[in-house]
Amino acid sequence: MSGTTRRMFIKQSLFGAGALTLTSSLKGLGSSQPRIEISLAEWSLHRALYGGKLDHLDFPAKAKRDFGISVVEYVNGFFGGGKIDFREAGKSVAYLKELLTRSEDAGVVNHLLMVDDEGPLAAPDEKARLSAVDNHKKWVEAAKVLGCKTVRVNLLGEGSADEKKAASVDSLGRLGEFAQTMKLNIVVENHGGVTSNGAWLAGVVKQVSRPNVGTLPDFGNFCISQPWGTTQDGCENMYDRYKGMEELLPYAKGVSAKSYDFDANGEQPLMDYKRLIGLVKASGYKGYVGIEFEGNTQPEEEGIRKTKALLEKYL
């Protein structure tokens, strides 16, 4: 589909069924949000999705039916359900309309779209960086159609921390400007490497200085030495997660409540959830906290329910 055709569809969708979802999403976020609420990140069910036990189109209904959660966060890599390339699914009018219909029928708000594998936004090389920015734009457009409020991106690329910072500021500024025309947010997650350094990432967002560009602080992704920042399998260079959360929360437009395998007491042995939630509340953040279960040995559905119970306990 051409960019022009996609944009025409987006405009039409805003005056059709998508308008209701978008309005609901906007009411649920921002300064008017009176409290912190729970959403469900699709990655929590990545084993079921990769294994063919769950189709991407059925995720909204499952979130509501099985977990009592009516706000969802999508992952672009699951679009198409393995039947068509996820990038093509993200541009497909029919596919986006079907997902929008499924979520509306389930009474679910589409809140956030996580984007991976679309190029190095932190690449010092201008050609590679601008190509990555362009690749991300179709997902901003898709998010608008679905009624999402926010698009999450990653800052990947080769080079020194300073080179990556300059490149990241440029990329986020461009994407922020593009997303602003659709009244959407662009957020960056601490996701391994230098991005797991809370001070570095906060500095990038501060330098971008756009009201619609912020952070998506993740409880678990503070491992600097591993590509995606996981702590499940150990870490040689761990950034202080509590310090990192304090540094990123002032710019937060979402929070990712990462969880791993639970102990016998229903707690997270790798992190102090009570302290983390306390930091979120103390920051004054109002909005959605997304469950993102990433345990290896416990069933995904059990992990989601236990994470939800833990959040409700401390919220």
Image (tube, grey):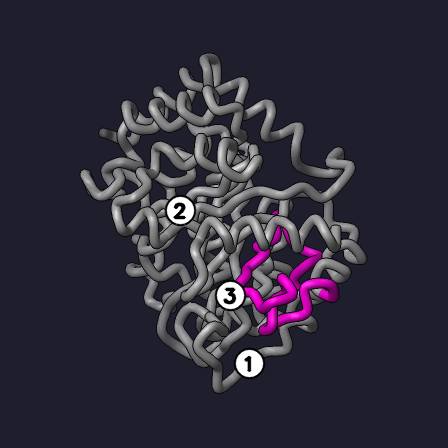
Q: Give the range drawn in magenta.
A: 248-275
Q: Callout 1, which amino acid?
A: Met
Tag 1 or tag 3, which sits nearer the N-term?
1
Tag 2 or tag 3, which sits nearer the N-term?
2
Q: Name the residue under label 2.
A: 75
- In which quarter of the view is residue 92 placed? top left
User: Dot 2, how many residues are within 10 Å of its Cα: few (below 14), some (14-19), or many (20+)?
Assistant: some
Left or right, 37 with respect to 134, comes to: right
Comparing 125 with 77, the one in front is 77
Comparing 130 with 63, the one in front is 63
Q: Is mark 3 on a helix, strand or loop?
A: loop
Residue 298 point in image, percent of width and height: 45, 61
> Which residue is pictured at 32% across the width and 57% down the height?
119
Quarter of the image for the N terminus: give it. Answer: top left
Between the C-alphas of marks 1 and 2, the distance is: 26 Å
305 over 222 or under it: above or below: above
Q: Callout 3, which amino acid?
A: Asp
> Which residue is pictured at 68% across the width and 58% down the height?
249
Q: Callout 2, which amino acid?
A: Val
- In which quarter of the view is residue 246 placed? bottom right
Residue 64 is tagged as none
182 over 218 or under it: above or below: above
Q: Is mark 2 on a helix, strand or loop?
A: strand
Between the C-alphas of marks 3 and 1, the distance is: 19 Å
Q: Mark 1 points at which residue?
A: 238
User: Dot 3, how many residues are within 10 Å of its Cα: few (below 14), some (14-19), or many (20+)?
Assistant: many
Q: What element carries label 1?
A: loop
